[in-house]
Image (tube, rainbow, N blue to C red):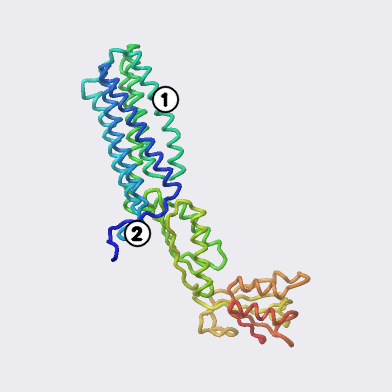
Amino acid sequence: MPASSDSSTTVGVKPVEIEKRRWMLASTLLNAFLALVKLGWGLYSGSTVVLADAIHSLSDVVGAALIYIAVRVAPHHSRRFPLGLYKLEDMAAVAAGVGVLFAGYEILRSVFVGEGVTPPNQPLATLLIMGAILALQVGFFVFEKRASKRLRSPGLNSDVANWFGDIGSGIVVLVGIGGHLLRIPYVQEFAVVIIALLIFHSAFEVIRDGLLSLLDASLAQEEEQVARDFLLSVPGIERVSELIVRKAGSALFLKATVEMDNQGFDTAHQLVDELEEQLKRKIPALEKVTIHYEPFRKPQKRIALLYASDRKTPATVFGKAHSILIRDLPENASDLNPPAGSATREIWVTNPFLDDPHGRAIKLAAWLIRQRVDKVYLNAEKAPVDGSANALVDLLASAGIVLEPRL
């Protein structure tokens, strides 16, 4: 009986995904614990600012739990979602970012629109407890931020912004209580504005990146350039006609179309399989790589004519040719007597192996193959080449090059 289209199967979970889950679980549990501590102390001490900070932390717990669920679900594949549910991580990041914006607004509103901050009845104990909580928050924030950059996870990045908001709220609490004790006017309001701006900036970046990823905007320019440079460095690949790197959550999906020189189907297919594995090793965030290959078609033919040093007398020995005329022509043009103006390119090149004591013919043949020549002309006296005639003819023929012994 066929499986339902919605039945999901869990593929092998990558270590990266497991690490992200652990970070989100630790974040949720620690945030919940600290929020309960703040709530309990706020009720005991009667401090409205501590209570407000506790409510803010509880809202972060909800956001962290949401992202944790998204990270757990994202790698799961199904028939309906064959590429996984990585976009859920972006959706959760956007939702959490909006929550951070709202929390920043609430901080400003409570100070400038509400009744202000009521100091606690035990200010020194409150300073000590809130300072200890702030130290824990800063420590976790630093380590999770490093993990977020290393794992390239928008979900963790959003959670880092939440922790930054918590740190900002904690600083506001400490400044408010300390300012009350020192009788410093407006110091709390000034601190609130600075922290709120930082919170808004972090939330904006999280929301922006999440929305751009959901809209399939190009966010992986660095990885795209790495992939393009690698593909063009592979012998046999003449051109990368299409390259798209799509971002979904912390995963990347690459699709490319490459044009290859003359290769058999089996050889090309094997090369593509190897390229896909090598790209995944070079860019670990790649979840799936799809490479299509097409034969490289030159728009014209390329002829090489071998001459002596005067560039008029045809060469009689392949390896001892002094000058080489490389000529690009339309397919229907004559090789030796093309109509005036029909050649799109003509360039003279001195034989780069003329002074080599051994193997000049083979080296020159290999060089002509790299120049994508279709046909080679010279005036051979007896054999078409000097030295290892059969090996040279076979080498040229294997590359699809025709050797014409009469120029």
Q: Nearer the viewer, residue 325 or 164?
A: 164
Residue at position x 43%, y 36% in the image: 144
Q: Is residue 247 above or below residue 138?
A: below
387 relative position to 338: left or right: right
Question: Hey, which residue is sitting farthest left in the picture?
Answer: 114
Q: Which residue is drawn at 71% across and 79% down?
A: 318
Residue 392, by quadrant, is bottom right
Quarter-of-image position of residue 359: bottom right
Q: Position of residue 7 (x, y in %)?
A: 29, 58
- Mark 2 residue type: Pro
Callout 2: SS = loop
Residue 120 rendering spot, x and y as whole percentages: 28, 15
Task: Return the residue nearer the eye: 287 or 367.
Answer: 287
Residue drawn at the location 30% of the way across and 46% of the way down: 91
Residue 135's label in the rendered image is: 1
Q: In this view, does 30 lie above or below 125?
A: below
- Disc 1 marks a residue whose amino acid type is Ala
How far across and down, in percent of the image, does residue 180 sit? 31, 14
Along the line of sight, the residue nearer the viewer: 272 or 181: 272
User: Secondary structure under badge 1?
Assistant: helix
Asked if 183 appears above or below 237 in the picture, the reply is above
Which image quadrant is residue 244 in?
A: bottom left
Could you tell me if the residues under marks 2 and 1 are in contact, i.e. CB atoms within 8 Å?
no
Q: Where is mark 2, residue-wise?
A: 82
Give the quarter of the figure containing the C terminus. bottom right
- Mark pair 2, 1: CA separation: 43 Å
Is residue 313 visible from the viewing direction of this image?
no
How crowded is the residue under tag 2: few (<14 C-alpha within 10 Å), some, or many (20+)?
few
Q: Position of residue 385 (x, y in %)?
A: 71, 82
In this view, the residue farthest toward the right is 357
